[in-house]
């Protein structure tokens, strides 16, 4: 179930580490029961994160009475873009023009306000890791800003968390912040979002400018089997 005491402690840490910044905790509820999600919202959670479209749709149909934002934090599948665009408020992991175009078209067709998105950047530089290469960010960002169905809010990153690698995580979070600032300078756009930091490293992410924290285990414990 949802850990209210831990939620309160995380809010305290946010106030301590980022007192002047507007930080939102996305409670990553994949694999969690609807009752736990209701408890999270009752405690003050305003954003729920899901990684699997069908699971999210099933849950959302049971939670229509809640005033909460829905964030998609998983990998985007081409056959799910319409469902994503029509049922989520945010998509965190856009990585190429094709994904962006499909999301924009589906959002426009639904007659909704622009979908809030983040571009996912490959912070490790390792081949095969999810995300766009940093040197391609400007080109993709320029394209996304032309799409009427999308609103580019910032960048998302998934640094690997390994025990004892706090310095590495910090440097990667700092790099994402610098890439965001570079996009703002070179493209003349205002980006207000850094989606980075999970249960094991959110404090480091906060210290490097995170505005969206994606927390699952820290709030719900291990997922149910």
Image (tube, rainbow, N blue to C red):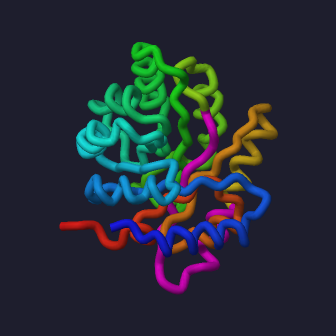
Name the one closer to the observer, 11 or 39. Answer: 39
Which quadrant of the view contains residue 80?
top left
Residue at x-position 55% and y-position 42%: 119
Magenta stretch bounds:
152-174
User: Where in the figure is residue 193, as x and y percent of width and height?
Assistant: 65, 46
Image side of residue 33 versus residue 137, left or right: left
User: Where in the figure is residue 109, as x and y percent of width and height?
Assistant: 41, 13
Q: Quadrant of the C terminus?
A: bottom left
Q: Quadrant of the N terminus?
A: bottom left
Residue at x-position 36% and y-position 55%: 37
**161 magenta-colored:** yes
Which quadrant of the view contains residue 210?
bottom right
Residue farthest to the bottom, as pictured: 164
Residue at x-position 57% and y-position 74%: 9
In the image, residue 76 above or below residue 30:
above
Q: Is residue 53 visible?
A: no
Name the one closer to the observer, 30 or 68. Answer: 68
Residue farthest to the left, as pictured: 225
Q: Is residue 178 visible?
A: yes
Name the one closer to the observer, 44 or 86. Answer: 44
Q: How many marks?
A: 0
């Amino acid at each position: 179930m949802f850990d209210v005491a831990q939620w309160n402690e995380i809010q305290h840490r946010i106030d301590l580490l980022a007192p002047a910044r507007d930080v939102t905790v996305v409670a990553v509820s994949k694999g969690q029961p609807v009752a736990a999600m209701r408890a999270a919202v009752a405690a003050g959670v305003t954003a729920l994160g899901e990684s699997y479209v069908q699971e999210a749709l099933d849950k959302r149909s049971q939670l229509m009475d809640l005033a909460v934002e829905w964030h998609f934090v998983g990998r985007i599948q081409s056959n799910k873009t319409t469902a994503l665009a029509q049922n989520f408020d945010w998509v965190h992991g856009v990585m190429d023009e094709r994904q962006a175009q499909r999301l924009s078209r589906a959002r426009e067709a639904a007659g909704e306000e622009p979908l809030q998105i983040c571009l996912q950047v490959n912070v490790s530089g390792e081949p095969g890791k999810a995300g766009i290469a940093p040197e391609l960010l400007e080109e993709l960002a320029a394209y996304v800003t032309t799409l009427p169905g999308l609103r580019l809010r910032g960048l998302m990153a998934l640094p690997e968390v390994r025990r004892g690698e706090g310095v590495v995580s910090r440097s990667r979070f700092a790099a994402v912040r610098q890439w965001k600032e570079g996009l703002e300078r070179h493209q003349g756009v205002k980006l207000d979002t850094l989606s980075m930091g999970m249960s094991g490293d959110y404090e480091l992410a906060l210290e490097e400018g995170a505005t969206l924290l994606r927390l699952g285990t820290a709030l719900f414990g291990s997922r149910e089997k």
